[in-house]
Amino acid sequence: MTDDIQTAEADTPVGKFKITGASLNNLATFASLVLLCLVAVTLYAHAGDAKESAKAVAAELRDANREVANALKESNKEISQTLREMSRATREQNCLLSLPPEQRQKNAEVCRRISQ
């Protein structure tokens, strides 16, 4: 079994470089490690950004829900007031309808007070 270590040479303006097979493996391993570290740092930074934007979205939703709840509360107050007025008018009308037609005009004020 022969252990042939292959070499590669490169002439550059800076100088002449010679790389053997073992050092090429070391260089590839080091480059992979650096790349892995860069990916890990990028993922860590992205996770922090994602948390911040999730908090911002949650705050916006909370504010929007608060505005909707206030609008619904006001709307419910108006509907409740309208229903009270309708109930009063219905009670007054029922009182008037329970009387004979000739007595309705005279007792209109009495039915109005009773219905409130």
Image (cartoon, rainbow, N blue to C red):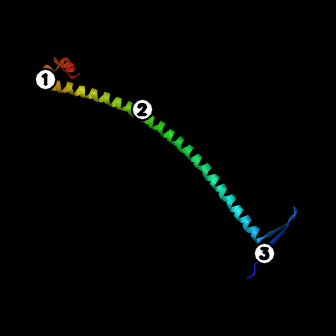
The residue beneath circle 3 is: 6
**Residue sitting at 20 percent across and 26 percent down?**
91
Residue 111, which numbered label? none
The answer to which of 73 and 110 lies nearer the viewer is 73
Distance from the alpha carbon under mark 2 to that under mark 1: 47 Å
Q: Position of residue 57 (x, y in %)?
A: 52, 42
Say if mark 2 contacts mark 1, CB within 8 Å: no
The answer to which of 15 and 96 lies nearer the viewer is 15
Q: Amino acid at mark 2?
A: Asn
Q: Give the side of residue 53 with respect to residue 25, left or right.
A: left
Q: Position of residue 37 (x, y in %)?
A: 66, 56
Q: Give the side of residue 90 with respect to residue 99, left or right.
A: right
Q: Secondary structure beneath disc 3?
A: loop
Residue 78 position (above or below residue 29): above
Q: Give the side of residue 58 with respect to residue 87, left or right.
A: right
Q: Where the N terminus falls, by quadrant?
A: bottom right
The residue beneath circle 1 is: 101
Most extreme residue toward the bottom is 1
Q: Residues within 10 Å of mark 3 (few under 14, many from 20)?
A: few
Question: Closer to the N terminus: mark 1 or mark 3?
Answer: 3
Q: Position of residue 18 (x, y in %)?
A: 83, 68
Q: Amino acid at mark 3?
A: Gln
Residue 24, picture quadrant = bottom right
Q: Position of residue 32 (x, y in %)?
A: 68, 62
Q: Where the C terminus falls, by quadrant?
A: top left
**Residue sitting at 15 percent across and 26 percent down?**
97
Can you tell which of label 2 and label 3 is closer to the viewer? 3
The residue beneath circle 2 is: 70
Q: How many marks?
A: 3
Q: Amino acid at mark 1?
A: Pro
**Residue sitting at 67 percent across and 55 percent down?**
38
Q: Secondary structure beneath disc 2?
A: helix
